[in-house]
Image (tube, grey):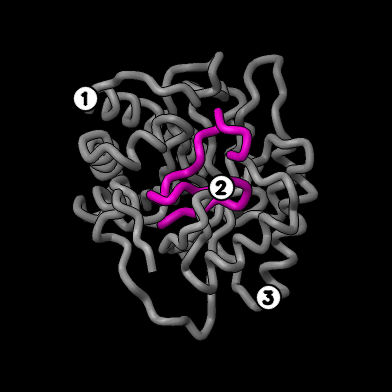
Amino acid sequence: MFVAPFFCAALAAKGRASVFRVDLNCDLGESYGAYKLGVDEEILPYVTSVNIACGFHAGDPGIMRKTVDLALKNKVAIGAHPGLPDLIGFGRRNMAISPQEAYDMAVYQIGALAGFVKAQGGRMQHVKPHGALYNMAAKSKDLARAIAEAVYKIDPELILFGLSGSELVCAGESMGLRTAHEVFADRTYQEDGSLTPRSHPDALIAGHEQAVVQVIRMVQEGRVTSQQATEVAIQADTVCIHGDGAAALAFARHIREVLERSGIVVQSFSK
């Protein structure tokens, strides 16, 4: 089995499980001011964890409060989704930031969402960086450690979500955090285990059935086929679906049904 070069020791070989369990997470709270993005309320019944934008790449204080409220009402686990300060680019453009800046950005945003969660009587489960920040930290040890340190210092009980086998997951484990290896339902992979950049025409999987087949295989077999036709070792603790696509709701409903029909237990990672 091919193991991607940037994978750290956090990706361990595992035997075939008798019962497969997976968390189903979705990025929500991405509206901003007068601009509405996604169908948050409709998707919530089908996922077990949500990553709520914290105002840098998307979201605003009112949207954060409303999304936290919706998640609590639906008994869905809540996570902070800190990103780069790039509203126009939706946090998907790389920025030359230092580890100190990454740490400061993470503390600022996680703290903001944690305030809303506490004010509304809830408890935050996890942190998952967004977009370019997420992908940069997947490969950069220094950025990964800065983000993991921010999470740990805010609350060492928080779970750090990161790309399966990445430096971010490795840094979280080294810091003493619980971590969740994340895989993506609607994204294609490169042979080094990274996601295909969105600038490439084949970055997204448009067909629902192709995406579902990829997810089932990642959960049950621990592997994914890259765009270079190589087999990449992968660990699927949590599966990301996106809430901003044209068919997001239909896909959320479909993948939840197929996972359960396949005998896979769908529940939040903290359970």
> Residue beneath label 3, please?
262
Name the residue type under label 3. Ser
User: For residue 164: magenta?
Assistant: no
Please tell me which residue lies in front, 150 or 99: 99
Which contiguous range is marked in magenta?
A: 181-203
Q: Which mark is residue 188?
A: 2
**Which of marks 2 and 3 precedes in the sequence?**
2
Q: State the SS at label 3.
A: loop
**Which of marks 1 and 2 precedes in the sequence?**
1
Residue drawn where x is 27% and y is 50% of the image: 172
> Residue beneath label 1, please?
100
Relative image position of residue 216 (x, y in whole percent): 61, 67
Check contact, mark 2 vs mark 1: CB within 8 A. Answer: no
Relative image position of residue 80 (x, y in whole percent): 46, 38
Q: Marks 3/1: CA distance? A: 44 Å
Name the residue type under label 2. Thr
Relative image position of residue 119 (x, y in whole percent): 49, 36
